[in-house]
Amino acid sequence: MPGAVPIVFLHHSTGEAVWRGGLPRFIRDWNRAHGTSYELTELTYPACAGAHTRLRRHLPARLFNALFKDHYPWSNYPYDYWNLWVRHGGSMRDRGELNLADLAREYQMIVFKHCFPVSAVRADDGAPDLASPVRTLANYRLQYEALKARMHQYPQVKFLVWTGPPLLEGVTSPDAAARAREFADWLKGTWEEPGDNIFLWDYRQLATDGGLYLHPERGTGPADSHPSPGFAAKVAPLLGRRIVDVIEGRGDSGSCTGE
């Protein structure tokens, strides 16, 4: 990728914490040291409801929902990426949100993630449904297979996907946490394919050391699974290094955690 490389990081609050932990600084320092021109942008995505998060904090839920009922909900789970990128394509968009064609026209690399409730994985109900927002392992797998097929239609774009941010032990169950880890293992062992344009950053491994739960000292409180400022500052350069490895052709050979 010679010359300037436009990169977008799509996120909500967990990603914002890592962004503020020093991700832009890492990219600026890399450019300065290596003579590269990697241009990193962040976008709240899906964005419409996110533009009103301050109002959300101050308005009763019923009033907020009435005012912004036509905006996309504050959700960025596998169903939502499938809905926004696979179900909606070309000139089709859901409530004004950018689809993958829109993003692929602007960026040579797309980094995306889910918020930590993605790890509250329900037991399979025996009826997997690609178009279901219910967060089960079976639905996640169907949606991710469809997302992979869609991303393969944009070979000029590199994609970097986070493994799911884990939950603290006190806000989930052992069974749900085990299913979340099973999904991350499936992503790493089955879904990701060497030689294509899709890569993983293993945030879950960094946050859990391979266990089921976010370590308490890495969260922001006893019931808040957002990364603490200290942990965000620790992993932001690792995400930066993973981004650089993917851009520079080391996506399959470099560390999945960026370490």
Image (cartoon, helix red, strand yellow):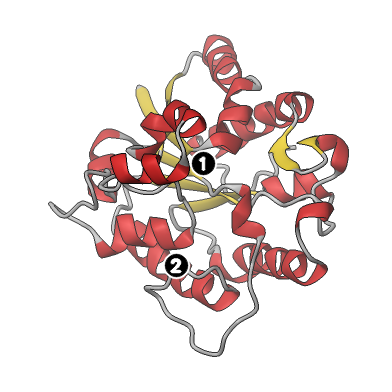
**111 on left or right of 30:** left
Residue at the (43%, 63%) spot, across then down: 79
Can residue 68 be seen in the rendering of this structure?
Answer: no
State the residue in front, 4 or 100: 100
Can residue 111 be seen in the rendering of this structure?
Answer: yes
**155 on left or right of 113:** left
Q: Which residue is mark 2?
A: 133
Residue 195 numbered tag: none
| Residue type, label 1 | Gly
Question: SS of the residue at dot 2?
Answer: loop
Question: SS of the residue at dot 1?
Answer: loop
**Label 1 crowding class (10 Å Cα cut-off): few <14, some 14-19, many 20+?**
few
Q: State which quadrant residue 117 falls in.
A: bottom right
**Label 2 crowding class (10 Å Cα cut-off): few <14, some 14-19, many 20+?**
some
Indicate the quadrant containing the N terminus: top left, top right, bottom left or bottom right. Answer: top left
Which residue extends farthest left? 91
Label 2 to label 1: alpha-carbon separation: 35 Å
State the residue in front, 69 or 5: 69
Residue at the (68%, 32%) spot, across then down: 238
Q: Against 236, is 64 above or below?
A: below
- Mark nearer the viewer, 2 or 1: 2
Which residue extends farthest top? 32
Q: State which quadrant residue 90 falls in.
A: bottom left
* Earlier-in-chain disc, 2 versus 1: 2
State the residue in front, 187 or 158: 187
| Residue type, label 2 | Pro
Q: Which residue is mark 1?
A: 249
Residue at the (27%, 49%) spot, across then down: 99
* Residue 5 point in image, percent of width and height: 38, 27
